[in-house]
Amino acid sequence: MTIGSMLGDIVNSFFKRPATGRYPFVRTEAPEDLRGKVVWNPETCTGCGLCVKDCPSQALELFTLDKAAKRYVMLYHMDCCTYCAQCEVSCRSKSIYLTNDEWELASTSRTPFEVYYGREEDVQKVLEPEPQGEPDLSPESKTE
Amino acid sequence: MNLSLSPLVELLFFPGGLVLLASGLVYEFVDRKLVARFQNRIGPRWFQPLADVIKLLAKEEVIPAGVVKGLFIFLPIVALTSILTAALYVPMFGLKPAFSFPGDLVVTVYLLSLMTLCIGLAGANTEDRFSLVGATRALTQMFSYEAPFLLALLGPAIALGTWNIGQINSAAGNNLWFIIAQPFGFIAAVIGLMGKLELPPFDAPEAETEIVAGALTEYSGRGLALFRIGRDVELVIGLTLIASFYLGGLANPLDFLWKTLILLLVTAALQSLFARLRIDQTVGLWWRIGSIMVLLQLLAVVVGRLIAPLIPFLSSGG
Amino acid sequence: MGAEKKPEKFVVSIGPQHPALKEPGHFEFAVEGEIVTSATARLGFVHRGMEKGTESRTWVQNLYLMERVCGICSAVHAMAYAQGVEKLAKVEVPPRARAIRQLIAELERIHSHLLWLGVAAHEGGFDTLFMLSWRDRETVMDLLEAITGNRVNYSANVLGGVKIDIDEVKSAAILKGMDFLEERTRHYMKVVTEDETFLGRTRKIGTMTLEQALRLGSVGPTGRASGVPYDVRVDAPYAAYQDFPVNIVTDTAGDLEARFVVRIKELYESYRVIRELVDHMPAGELTTRIPRRIQEGEVVSRVEAPRGELFYFLKSNGTDMPERIKVRTPSLCNWGSILATAVGHRLADMPMILAGIDPCFSCNDRMILVKRGNDQTVWTWEDLRRYGIEYYK
Ligand code: SF4
Ligand code: SF4
């Protein structure tokens, strides 16, 4: 039976540095294994489409430009991504993975959330489709 | 002390009116900051109370269906006015009270209570369930703390033989501090002030997890802003009263500053130390412990006054 | 004190939007003065159609959907689901993965119980306890973030194992965190069992007897505080609970204070078992392969979520999508206890009694269609949508 049993706490707290922070002005370190923005490596991707298939939030789209030459473009919808790392687990060639340095991804418009990965000329092609190189959205045809 | 300002300036700016409002906001800020630090938080920045008030003033005032419209608009104004009037009789900022007459202590205390009364009426005026419950609780609480608070302030008054705040203030400075002579009265006064202001743990009338904002649930915009400023100023006045009565009087602004701030530190600590009391617990606490404590104190004072004129009273003014 | 107009019942309705409720739910308390004379609850404001949603997603995708049934106990949902799928597919998860699953689940329990401690304190108007317990809770949140990479939906599980591993550095961090938390928790135990003002709000409030608890089917700490000796971790061990057992914590008082005590004692248990797990983490693989198409069958999977028994029913038709998934979350079992204990208490006690079961609204809001006769109705998304619009009109 005591009254004010947190007296010690409040006196302590009073002289301690506050536990809360002024976030946008003072930043904290992110842990090493933080799951940040997904990146994709066009050089090693085999175009199997497993990552697209397994992504629970349909955050990935794979455009096949030339299957034989392994020319693919990945469209990553950052706003859909839940940072679950399933794509990283599903990929057998380690072509898609989560980074740990980019995590302050908020934005006031939608455009920065559409991230195209791939060789520059391929991305160009996806963005401005020419009549012959029409990209097809082909996750279905690619699996297993 | 004897600056001669024209009464109009005194009323509008200093120490009345604007400066009073500003000081209310500053004290609210200090209070919030202190509580935050007691809880190991950073707390608001200095302009937060002002920003809140400006935001509220800029907002539309929604008048809900089912209220008496005039009363709804009128009550916040009455509340604020009564508080500002009360300030005139109190040695704000360590200056001499702007006005005074014998017995102004009683008037001041009642002007302060008018605030709670207005809040209670404001709650009862609406049809909102939360407001009604809040209003009943606010009034119930008022009836329980009003007596001990007044009695606590009467202690020094009786001991000094004057009911004039200004005289008590100057006499208190020349005496043994009443916090030592009448410790129970001091405790009752501090707790009574917290009850008056509905600060935690006596915030049952506006317990947000039960009844949202209590009696003021339906208020938004200007009305809410006025009530808030009123309460802030009431805080300053209350602290000033207690400091001048129990902490050896307020002789100058510096005196005022450090004494009220220390008091604020104490109340902030008390605010963070306890869980909210239910309204029945608040009432029980007051009537069972508070009043008896203060009554005994008062009895001691009266008896002391009767049997011992040996104590060197320097009731200079009276 | 009390309502002036006596003839009609004075009903205070709380919710769906109310500061005491962090999630939408609706309660109506009829009061006489401050005393509550009857209580009713209406739920279903956050029905999200998840069970139906699982039927159009693959087994892999569903893991992440189920993780989002609850934001506070996300890992146990994923774990219950993953364990069910693994049972269906008849694959054995490696011991290290099982231990890591248990580790994450226990860390989550710590975060959940500390969260509850803060929320309950806040409902009782004890904001300092609220702030400070949440400050300390950051320790375990940071640990979870450091281990899994996410602060809330950890996504530590995959079908067939776990994604993440515990190395030396993380083990050391966990042990350090546990020491700090244990010390703090012992202090909070003192506060909630000794502080006079707080006890005034918890002792002999919302008392539920053992008999009531059994009749109402209370689960988890709510039931255990009334003496129901039931804990899935003990009664039907999963993950690595066989090798790293926990002790069941019960109390007999059944009031709010007992619920505080039970939950805090469970925290001690969690600290102990986490230390053991970290010290004796079995070596080996983290995952096994699991087929994409799950063979036909039905399975029940149960785990002990921080709030009580979590129940999953999975049915597969041999494709890569489930046929039916049924979830029963612990909060659903505990609502009855609120309504049963509310009457006779003061209005001021209601938030505390509500918080006492550690309710989670969104995770128990699901639709039940009672089938009469043998009409073979299958609802499509469109039907559901239309029903939803009708329901909320
Ligand atoms: S992290 Fe998860 S949600 Fe994000 S892209 Fe990968 S699989 Fe999709
Ligand atoms: S899973 Fe890997 S290899 Fe397959 S499409 Fe995705 S990134 Fe390419």
Image (cartoon, coloured by chain):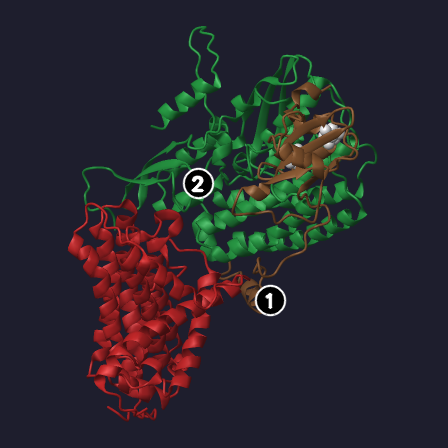
Residue placed at 37% from the left, 79% from the top? B243
Q: Colour of chain B?
A: red
Up-down relation of residue B240 to residue B79 (above or below): below
* Side of A138 where C14 appears, left or right: left
Q: Residue at x 36, y 74 (%)?
A: B23
Callout 2 environment at 10 Å: few (<14), some (14 to 19), or many (20+)? Answer: many
The kind of residue tagged 2 is Leu
Which residue does the numbered mark 2 point to in the structure image?
C354
Q: Nearer the observer, disc 1 or disc 2?
A: 1
User: Are both tags, 1 and 2, on one chain?
Assistant: no
The residue at the far front in this view is A131
Whether the residue under disc 1 has CB within 8 Å of ligand 1: no
Left or right: residue B181 compared with residue B131:
right
Q: Residue furthest top?
A: C374
Q: Nearer the viewer, residue C107 or B202?
A: C107
Image position, residue B173 (x, y; %): 36, 88
In the picture of the structure, the residue carrying the numbered disc 1 is: A16
Where's residue B150, x and y in %?
27, 72
A115 vs C106, nearest the viewer: A115
Chain holding disc 2: C
Determine the secondary structure under disc 1: loop
Rendering colour (chain A): brown
| Nearer to me, B106 or A124 | A124
Shown in green, the chain is: C
> Do the residues bearing badges 1 and 2 touch, measured as CB atoms within 8 Å?
no
Tell me, yes or no, if residue A132 can be seen here.
yes
Q: Give the letter of the chain under mark 1.
A: A
